[in-house]
Structures are given as structure tokens and as C-alpha cells.
Image (tube, helix red, strand yellow):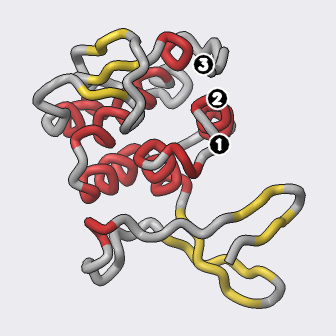
Amino acid sequence: MSFEFRGSDFVPVPVPPALRRLPDQGGGFVDVARGGLPVRVTTLERTLVDVLDAPRHGGGWEEIWHSLESVEFFDVDAVTDYALKLGSAVTVAKVGFFLEQHREELMLEDKHFERLQQHVPSQPMYLERGRRESGKLLSRWNLVVPERVLNRTWAEVA
């Protein structure tokens, strides 16, 4: 059930099919108190991967980037572990691309990208499923990224 809290809408998102049979559903959950009751929410690391995996839940690329950029620290090992659990090479590439764009702010080194790079798509894929928007091929991730996302111009294409 959706709810609003401090001016933000919170919408439950189903556990990805690849994780539904795992006892911990992929991990990355914490319980927080809400009105004296425990509420299960995802960690920042799982949220980063989930929103890149299913951007329709994030309000568009501009909103996703702004929201994720407001986080000062991510446990990159937890991000990588969870991304790999999803079993989606495209999601791994998206995560790698996002982390690479924020390499300096997150103080990342080459070693943080090595595990992800082993699981990128074997052929070029588009950033967003079903949307064949032209862009630049980032060979490191085998990902076609629209210029507006790559350069963060955010001029929405109609």
C-alpha cells in the first residue's frame, strides 16, 4: 500500500522475480520504526540497484540521478553483490555506469569496477528497456546511454 511521508510518496515495489525464492529475497533490507511499528525498507545500496534496474519506479533519469547523488556514501561491495544477485547483465552495466560517473565523489578505484565488468552484456544494450533512444556506446559497459543522461542535460525527449 502506498503512503505519503514528509511530502514524499512511498510506493511498495515487488521483489524482483530472480530473488523471490531466496530465503532473504536478496538481502538489503532494514526495519525502521514508523508510528511505533516496524516497517521493512531497502538499504541505500539495494535502492540504488533497484531504481537503476527498474527506472520506472524512480521518476525518470533526472530524478534518479538527483536522488542518488544526495547520498554521500554507498557500500560498493553491497551494491555489487546485490546487482550480481539480480542476474541481469544490463543492470550490472547500469550500476557500473552510474558508479563510474560518480567515481570521484564516492572515492572509487578500479578494483570497485572489476567484478561488475566481468558480468556486462555480451552485446550493446540500451539504458532503458523498450526505449531505443540514440546515444553513445560506452564500450566498458556495453551500454548505449542517451546524451541527456551521459551529460546530465535532462532535456526530456517527447
Judging depth in this view, the residue of 64 and 82 nearest the camera is: 64
Q: Mark 3 or 1, which is nearer the eye?
A: 3
User: What number is the disc on residue 62?
Assistant: 2
- List the residue tagged with mark 3: 157
How far apart marks 1 and 2 lie (CA) works out to 8 Å
Q: Is residue 123 left or right of residue 97?
A: left
- Spot the residue most to the front: 158
Secondary element under disc 1, as helix, strand or loop, is loop
Q: Type of residue at label 3?
A: Val
**Residue 116: image x %, image y %?**
24, 37
The kind of residue on which mark 2 rests is Glu
Q: Is residue 82 left or right of residue 111?
A: right
Q: Which residue is mark 1?
A: 59
Numbered mark located on residue 85 in the image:
none
Answer yes or no: do the residues labelled 1 and 2 have beta carbons within 8 Å? yes
Disc 3 + disc 2, Cβ < 8 Å: no
Which image quarter holds the C terminus? top right
Task: Classify 10 Å Cα crowding around label 1: few (below 14), some (14-19), many (20 and above).
Answer: few
- The N terminus appears in which quarter of the rendering? bottom right
The answer to which of 42 and 53 lies nearer the viewer is 53
